[in-house]
Amino acid sequence: MSAIHESGSAGLAAFAAELRPEQVPEPVWRRAEELLLDWFGSALAGKGARPVASVADFAAAMGPADGAAELLISRRRSSPLFAAMINAAASHVAEQDDVHNGAVFHPGAVVFPAALAAAQALRRSGAELLLAAIAGYEAGIRAGECLGRSHYRVFHTTGTVGGIAAAVATGRLLRLDARQMNHAIGTAGTQAAGLWEFLRTAADSKPLHAAHASASGLAAAYLARDGFRGAERILEGTQGMAAGMSRDADLSRLTDQLGQRWALLETSFKYHASCRHTHPAADALLQLMGQHGLSAREIVRVNAKVHVAALEVLGAVARPTTVHQAKFSMGTVLGLIACHGAAGIAEFERALDDTAVADFAARVAMEADAEVEAAYPRRWIGKVEVLTRDGRRLESRVEQPKGDPGNTLSRAELEAKAMRLAAFGGAAGPEEMRLALARLWDMRGAAVVGRLLPGERE
Amino acid sequence: MSAIHESGSAGLAAFAAELRPEQVPEPVWRRAEELLLDWFGSALAGKGARPVASVADFAAAMGPADGAAELLISRRRSSPLFAAMINAAASHVAEQDDVHNGAVFHPGAVVFPAALAAAQALRRSGAELLLAAIAGYEAGIRAGECLGRSHYRVFHTTGTVGGIAAAVATGRLLRLDARQMNHAIGTAGTQAAGLWEFLRTAADSKPLHAAHASASGLAAAYLARDGFRGAERILEGTQGMAAGMSRDADLSRLTDQLGQRWALLETSFKYHASCRHTHPAADALLQLMGQHGLSAREIVRVNAKVHVAALEVLGAVARPTTVHQAKFSMGTVLGLIACHGAAGIAEFERALDDTAVADFAARVAMEADAEVEAAYPRRWIGKVEVLTRDGRRLESRVEQPKGDPGNTLSRAELEAKAMRLAAFGGAAGPEEMRLALARLWDMRGAAVVGRLLPGERE
């Protein structure tokens, strides 16, 4: 592929525009199917969430009442712009959507909403939808890696590079050429936004960041098809994203081993329904309690040994006041693990009123660990130190949290997770889900991407 | 006002939400009327511009075909979201919209599109529209001043703080209380975006930045009315805008003399149809040629002595290839002034094919000037040095470019400018304009904000 030899935004655009189905290895196709199905479950989990309902109500007031794209939580339809917006918000609120460790980026929540909406509106095939998503993952993850850790310290990467990932996926479905694709990337990048400040006061911005990224990325691709020109070096230019939004950008990462290294395969599924930064410690604690047969009341102290970014993100939450904020509280997450053996979407709904969980949370501390920090962000090692009531000091360690590529979820586990998420907000019944999951597993052979769920009047 | 005693985003929000009509001095009301009328002309000037047409076509494909808000360039209607988007793009493309020197921010292009759309949809009075705009100007300008010069070096301030200004104006019309207003500011700020990188390759992003700011700001206010919570310290928080997007932020500027110093009165009208950074030198050259009775061919060299930000913005344009880029070329602007005595919207349309202008442009250089730099951004002094064919070295200086508050345009000049802008793209005929301008001058007394121009079928 000629794309490999170009650098910067143009190189990324050329790769994304010119990628052919036969160049994609079989395991990448299969993982893409799994990521799509996992995203679908996450989107259904957003039904009933107040911030998502606000976004959906705003969209209903401002957008058309019908259209070619499916709104998963309401069973209605609208234009692709609003479908991308609502489905993205819905899929990023329950903290169950996928994550790429190295980029600290949630690709599914921004790529699939735009790609599904565009594919439905343009009547593309299932294989074309999957290939568009693959291109979106590869581009977005590399953009996130390029902007580095200083970016993530202040900016919510899913909001910022998410627009580029959504633009690339949509651009594939619009069949943009390499030059148009770079204009789409430029137009998405100049709308890149999302700040972590919201987390301090339990504000509702996180799903909005995904919505903004997916919708503005989709818009960028449609505009590029119409001849609208974007900056040609939006990531690496002297007044571009790296210059303005990062202090440790590594521009070589933008086109790192394109077509050889598949970043999509490095993407993790979430098992616990909390911020990914809590998962390594949660798994280590679960393992330790199992190995030693401990109950929550036998534990007087937990030290979660974490990477620095975990302190930066989770440190903002002193005492959670909302369910969403609780998902960013290490104490609450470990409290749920210790008291209930699980930190799933249903457990979180009851976490704030659970005094046993709150008591346990008060016994949890976080500290930076040199080894964990050195491995981050490529590997997210989990380490906890536990002091027991009878005076034992125990340690536990997991190399990869559950859901990471080396410790992945099986297709059966992914289905079970999606069923739980659909049931949680009542977004779809078991029979509807059975049909939808079958449709998703068969996506690669679908001549046209149709609805995933029946409409509201069917 | 209690608002004056609070600081940060909350203080700004309280001032904006609690401002009462009787607290606004008469000259502020009058200038607001003038800024509204001047903005209206700028919006009409966008008719026919390709990037604006792309945005409008995208909106037509994705948005409703009718609604409560007016699309000035097409005479159609849509929902407030798309009216804000299209009218903002239209009003920021011809480089004729107003600018606040100290903040280097174009408030009109983001505030009025959102305010007009919301006022029409909510059937508010003309006075309420003007007061909403006043609040939007005061808040947005202070946010821009707060983020400082390092922000403007990479970020297009109109895109970034523009969302906050639009959110405040819309929030007034939605009658948000102080707390809701701060949520609106938080939600707008976390979507703040816009990078100067586009200018290097004559990309189309500038009007899109205004569109994005106005539309996302409007959305932020509607969401806040619905209970959607934003970050409470989006400007000053440790993971907020100042932390992520500025290196010289001055947080005290955010609430600087609220209710006493009226930043709206410091806003300049644009006379030339080019980037404001070219205006001081253009006026100085025009004055010098008049005083000495020089023609273009008698001038062999012009040194424009500018502030550093002018070099940073205009330096990106080596040789313009589009009309819009020509407006950022000091050589082209001074060439038009020298050859045609004016750099208006009509002159620019012919600038690229004009060899006399290109020849003159090649004789123009820019250099930083210590005195001009020291006064910037509060004062934009114009200085040029001219070498004549007969060997004279002449100098000229203007303290304030035409359109600045101390050298403002009269109401008659503003009307004439609006008539020219309407005629330029054929957006409205003379009789339609006469009626529209009368309606605009009477806005403060209007019981309900209606259409400014007749609909397409009327």
Image (cartoon, coloured by chain):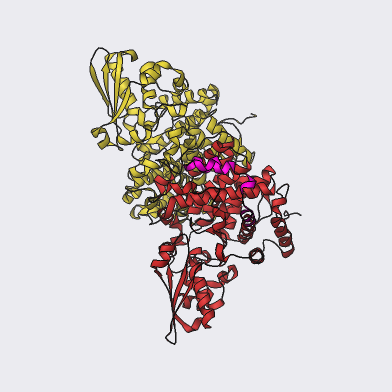
Chain colours: A yellow, B red
Residue A104 magenta: no
Nearest the camera: B310 or A181?
B310
Q: Quadrant of the C terminus of chain B?
A: bottom right
Nearest the camera: B356 or B6?
B6
Above or below, B250 against A28 in this view is below
Residue name at image x 67 percent, y 42 percent: B122
Residue name at image x 40 percent, y 46 percent: B244
Q: Quadrant of the N terminus of chain B?
A: top right
Quarter-wise, where is residue A271 in the image?
top left
Above or below, A6 against A307 in this view is below
Q: Position of residue B329 (x, y in %)?
A: 47, 68
Task: Name the main secondary structure of what is drawn in magenta.
Answer: helix
Residue B6 magenta: yes
Q: Position of residue A277 (x, y in %)?
A: 36, 31
Residue at the extreme bottom: B390
Q: Is residue A194 visible?
A: yes
Q: Position of residue A294 (x, y in %)?
A: 30, 14
Provide the residue span drawn in magenta.
Answer: B1-30
Q: Is residue A1 visible?
A: no
Number of numbered labels in the structure image? 0
Q: Position of residue B390 (x, y in %)?
A: 44, 87
